[in-house]
Image (cartoon, helix red, strand yellow):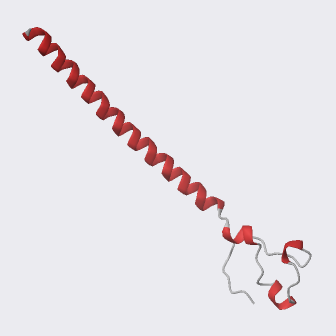
Amino acid sequence: MCRRSFSPYRKASLSDPRLGNHRPESIDCAWIATGCRFRPLTFTFDNVALCFLLVVVSRALTKQAAKRASNNKKMLVLIMRSS
């Protein structure tokens, strides 16, 4: 018997064609492979974290680029005035 705590994934039934020929005692432990290995909520949180990280990095790079452009503009004005 499977000793699993609560799981949102459904157990495979006896009539599930993906199970093939299994012994009856292994049926109650046979979890559908996609349900057991694929955890959509986990991937969703990973994707949200990745998107958040991309937004933070892109904002930092944009600020840095704006600061450099501002400094370059100031230097250009000083050079033009001194000429």
Question: Which residue occupies the extreme right position in the image?
Answer: 15
Q: State the image quarter where residue 56 is shown.
A: top left
Question: Which residue occupies the extreme left position in the image?
Answer: 82
Question: Which residue occupies the extreme front position in the image?
Answer: 83
Q: Position of residue 40 (x, y in %)?
A: 65, 59
Label count reads 0
Q: State the image quarter where residue 72 is shown.
A: top left
- Quarter of the rendering occupied by the N terminus: bottom right
What residue is at 7 percent from the left and 11 percent from the top? 82
Q: Position of residue 11 (x, y in %)?
A: 79, 75
Tell me if residue 82 comes above or below residue 24 in the rendering: above
Front-lying residue, 33 or 7? 33
Q: State the image quarter where residue 78 is shown.
A: top left
What residue is at 68 percent from the left and 87 percent from the top? 3
Tell me if residue 40 comes above or below residue 81 in the rendering: below
- Quarter of the rendering occupied by the C terminus: top left
Tell me if residue 65 comes above or below residue 41 in the rendering: above
What residue is at 44 percent from the left and 48 percent from the top? 53
The answer to whether residue 34 is left or right of residue 15 is left
Q: Position of residue 41 (x, y in %)?
A: 62, 59
Front-lying residue, 45 or 78? 78
Front-lying residue, 49 or 19? 19
The answer to whether residue 53 is left or right of residue 72 is right
Tell me if residue 43 comes above or below residue 33 in the rendering: above
Front-lying residue, 81 or 11? 81
Q: Position of residue 32 (x, y in %)?
A: 77, 72
What residue is at 86 percent from the left and 89 percent from the top? 23
